[in-house]
Image: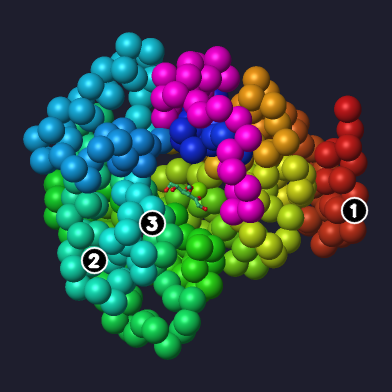
Amino acid sequence: MSTTYRFSLGPWNIHPGADPFGPPVRPPVSFDDVLCAAIDLGFAAVQFHDDDAVPALEDLPPAAIVREAREMRKRLDDRGLVPEFVAPRLWENTHGIDGGYTSNCSKARTWAIERSKRAVDVALALGCDLIVMWPAREGTNVRESKNPIEASRQMLLAIDAILSAAPNVRIAIEPKPNEPVDHAFVPTIGHALALGARSSDPARVGVLIETAHAILAGLDPADEMGFALAAGKLWSVHLNDQNGLKFDQDKVFGAANLRGAFDQVRVLELAGYAETGRFIGFDVKAQRTQRAGAATAHLATSKRIFEMLVAKVRSFPTKAAAECIANRDYESLERLVLEHLLAA
Ligand code: 3MF
Ligand code: MG
């Protein structure tokens, strides 16, 4: 059993700097460059959207999709990298304008399920069994535009369709309460786990927790992780940070709330997450101001801060803390934590 962590990144974590108010400011980064960066930064795995692995998948028959995914697998193999998961990217396609699984258009719903099955094909051809479901536009901007009861049923249908696509495929739902929609139908870990429990095979449905998404839901990321860990359902994480309730910032891990980051690492350590072999992902975004050569610094910093916090958790004075707890002296515990965080 290993107590060292394994890290993964997504190609979208290295990007040319476009935001909703301005165009790219750095040259595009080729997929090979992403793979090189992963190796240089000490990341072992790559996270994929289905069309990161097979860019033209909408125009290809299933057999060709599998062929291309196998080629991608070879590119990973050649570099000693592994795939962590594949996520169907429904939110960029015109069919998914109003959501995929919960669209008001039945053709779009059929498309979303078919596309998700292709994502399963891609995952299996890449050599991984994990599908991440971020239900990006599965929600409303105008509440009355959809029936939330029907939407829950449709989300369940989608989960079951993916589960039935292959006997070994697993789903990690990545909930987010808002953005790009005002109200998402699967806003929290509780919702995701409840849906999984109602699926055709609950053992194959878990969650991916992103720090910023939990904060946007007004929840504590460490406690969200604890809830999922208690159920044996935390199958991946997107560690990052978020400065209050605003757009999803994807800040460097620990950049807004270092103590909150410590608490997330603490709960992962309490659960022995490293020993499960599951990956630590950082869903962080390079600042738009970064010059091209330095546009992976946010990943390096997140990993470094994570590792420093692992050391902080492992050197935490647990005996002194236990005494504080036994005496119900939480003020002293507070001080112990703060002094430990500030100690060199
Ligand atoms: C959005 C996200 C997504 C997901 C990714 C994997 C683009 O806030 O977090 O990043 O993590 O699509 O499913
Ligand atoms: Mg994410």
Question: 46 above or below 150?
Answer: above
Mark 2 sits near ligand 1, with its Cβ under 8 Å away: no
* Residue kind at label 3, given as amino acid type: Trp
Decide: few, some or many residues near mark 1? Use Cα within 10 Å; few <14, some 14-19, many ≥20: some
Alpha carbon separation for disc pair 2 and 3 = 11 Å
Task: Kindly identify the residue that appears in the image at 42 percent across and 72 percent down.
Answer: 139
* Residue kind at label 1, given as amino acid type: Ser
Q: What is the x, y in percent for residue 62?
A: 11, 40
Quarter occupied by the C terminus: top right
Instruction: Name the secondary structure under disc 3.
Output: loop
* Residue kind at label 2, given as amino acid type: Ala
Q: In the depicted view, which residue is nearer to us: 79 or 28?
A: 28
Instruction: Name the secondary structure under disc 1.
Output: helix
Q: Mark 1 or 2 closer to N-term?
A: 2
Q: Residue furthest front?
A: 23
Q: Is residue 38 magenta?
A: yes
Q: Give the label, 3 or 1, closer to the camera.
A: 3
Q: Which residues are magenta?
A: 18-46
Q: Give the label, 1 or 2, closer to the camera.
A: 2
- Tag 1 residue: 332
Which label was assigned to residue 108? Answer: 2
Task: Kindly identify the residue that appears in the image at 58 percent across and 38 percent down.
Answer: 24
Instruction: Name the secondary structure under disc 2.
Output: helix
Quarter occupied by the N terminus: top left
Q: What is the x, y in percent for residue 221?
A: 61, 55
Q: Report how many numbered discs are placed on residues in the image.
A: 3
- Tag 3 residue: 91
Task: Kindly identify the residue that appears in the image at 72 percent across and 42 percent down.
Answer: 254
Alpha carbon separation for disc pair 3 and 1 = 48 Å
